[in-house]
Image (spheres, rainbow, N blue to C red):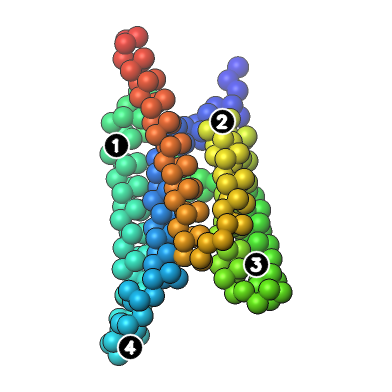
Amino acid sequence: MVDVLKLQKSTARYEFADGIREFHSAFWILVTGVYAWLFWDHPALWLSQVDTIRSQGTLFVILISFVLPIGIPLVISQLGLYYINQVVRRRWLWRNTGFIKPKSWVMPRRVLFIGYVISLCSFVIGILLAMQFADWWLIIRGIYVGTGLASAYMYWTLGSQMALPRYQWLARLGLPATLIIAVLPLSAGLFSLILSLFWAGLLTVSGLYAMRQVAMQQRGSADGA
């Protein structure tokens, strides 16, 4: 008798087999970290241009502030992910198993909801600490710490549900590192950059490990054939 639940779980786990999801997340974390670092710690690079940009109108402000630094990387990353799913994976990961359509919601919605709650609680704590110590940079720390804690929770849960040990290692390393970086005497921008670099690096290593495992399996299948 076929174990349908086991088959569904195996199919869902296959979406994470080659590390593509980690590379995609690492790219976005790196973009936001660099953007925050430039915005908070290097205002001289853009502050002198504020009046000139404003004089060009609201649409130009939106273009310079959001579309160029965030919108364009978003489009590039999404198109890149689509291309990888449609072309690269068909020729490599799915060449023996056939096409497997990725789920619209990669992370279970319950896990996402709890992750959002963790982020929100950290944000509120950051506000309260900022009011207590009159240090408004603590709000920025709260946002990034909350994101790191939520990521650790979501990767741990996903790793447990999908039987992916590398995701559990992501959580084991990411959680204490986030807390350690949070208490370092860093400026808001540098803190954001270092935390983003750490998580992006961690995800990249995880993705490379997964890709290597798939390559070894593909080589073993080819040799066996």
Give the number of the disc on residue 8. none
Determine whether, in the image, residue 41 is placed left or right of residue 182. left
Rounded to the nearest angstrom, the CA distance separating label 1 from label 4 is 46 Å
Q: Residue 104 at x, y = what percent?
A: 48, 48
Q: Where is residue 197 drawn, in percent x and y?
A: 44, 51
Q: Name the residue that disc number 1 marks.
A: 88
Q: Amino acid at mark 4?
A: Asp
Disc 3 marks a residue whose amino acid type is Gly
Q: Position of residue 59 (x, y in %)?
A: 32, 82
Measured Cα–Cα span from mark 3 to mark 4: 31 Å
The residues bearing labels 1 and 2 have C-alpha atoms spaced at a distance of: 25 Å
Q: Quadrant of residue 35?
A: bottom left
Q: Which residue is mark 3?
A: 126
The reply to whether the C-beta atoms of the residues labelled 1 and 3 are less than 8 Å apart is no
Q: Is residue 152 visible?
A: no
Q: Nearer the viewer, mark 1 or mark 3?
A: 3
Cα distance between the residues tagged 2 and 4: 51 Å
Position of residue 204 measured from the top left corner of the image (x, y, whole percent):
41, 41
Kind of residue sitting beneath label 1: Val
Judged left or right of residue 74, residue 145 is right
The quarter of the picture where residue 91 lies is top left
Q: Residue drawn at (69%, 69%), measured in percent from left and top?
A: 129
Q: Which residue is mark 2?
A: 165
x 41%, y 54%: residue: 30
Work out whether 9 lies above or below 76.
Answer: above
Q: Earlier in the sequence, mark 3 or mark 4?
A: 4
Rendered-image quadrant of the N terminus: top right
Q: Is residue 73 left or right of residue 32?
A: left
* In the image, residue 84 above or below residue 98: below
Q: Which residue is mark 4?
A: 51
Marks 3 and 2, how far apart in space? Answer: 32 Å
